[in-house]
Amino acid sequence: MTQPGIPNEYSLSTSCYGDRLKTIEDQAFATVAMGFRRMELGLAQEPIPLNGFHESRRETGIEVRSMVIGCLDSRSSAMTGTRLGSLDIDDRAQALLSCRRHIRIAAQYECPIVILRGSQVENPKLSVAADELHNRLVESGPDEGLVKEIAEHVAKVARSSQSQIDHFCRGIHKLIAEFPGVTIAVESGMHYNDLFSYETTGWMLEDLAKQGLRYWHDSGRVYMRERAGLPPQGQWLDSFANCLVGAHIHDSDGVLCEMPPGKGDVDFKLLAEYLPKEAEKVIEVNSRHPRAEILAAVQTLNSYGI
């Protein structure tokens, strides 16, 4: 197993710590102690303040290479970048302000990439139906009839979300123009009412890739969609490889994700074929997994050549 203190080239998401470490200094020192030279500011139930990080970085040499928009707010907050596509003009305006705040802080910490994770279509009926489909999948597995229903539902969400996608793209266009030194990337969604499906992600990249929008892959969440009969990981990677700047790397058994690589069914050999050498490779596992499993995940990923 990979030993503590042996440097590796992966990033570790701060979401892996959950509520165990209360300060950014503790997270930085713990990350370096496990051999990581890079860290990501990830989502947490209770975001921690960044006071003291400059000093921690000087002492440890750690870099912040990516930040998930919303990492400085509670997950329950509605005014993160996920509302850039809201049908409510005031919500969009506040979401744009929130994004600007996050991007300015990213620039302050010399963090080159900010990631926008999926948002839900603003249609209560479609959201309720998505939850029902997910519950049926968990209970009975992906039988042929259910897989067909899920595909039809996701297509309906895509059709219904066109106005939201248009609003989202306008907001992203503004941010790209305002912050040319920071790369903005969109990440694949997981839920069946998520705005960022395979189809809609293609729309966004077709519209804005020339302006600088990039794709961020999520191995576990895409696999959960794949198990439900939606486009598989290989299709996402093949379609968006030319825009790919990084990945959240974690495993999934089709029901749960954020598992350490090697504990589920994700095809990491396939990921290794597509992931550019210069791409950010962020290990993002649930905080219930201890340090030993994170270190073992590093060895697993090395074995696949990622």
Image (cartoon, grey):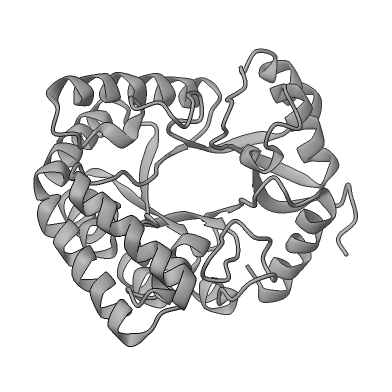
Q: Residue at x 68, y 61 (%)?
A: 260
The image position of residue 225, as x and y in percent, is: 39, 68
> Residue 118 or 50: which is nearer the viewer?
118
Number of numbered discs on residues: 0
Q: Residue 137: horizontal and vertical position, in percent?
A: 42, 71
Q: In which quarter of the image is the C terminus?
A: bottom right
Instruction: Please say if 229 is above or below 188.
Output: below
Measuring 73% from the left and 69% from the top, which residue is drawn there? 300
Q: In this view, does 90 lie to the left or right of 270?
A: left
The answer, for residue 287, to whether it is visible in the render is: yes
Query: Farthest residue in the bottom direction?
Result: 144
Position of 56 with respect to 71 (left or right) is: right
Q: Which residue is drawn at 17% across and 58% down?
A: 158
Q: Can you say whether 259 is above or below 212 in the image?
A: below
> Can you say which quadrant of the picture contains the N terminus?
bottom right
> Which residue shows up at 65% across the image and 13% down it?
51
In this rendered view, identify the residue nearer to me: 284 or 64. 284
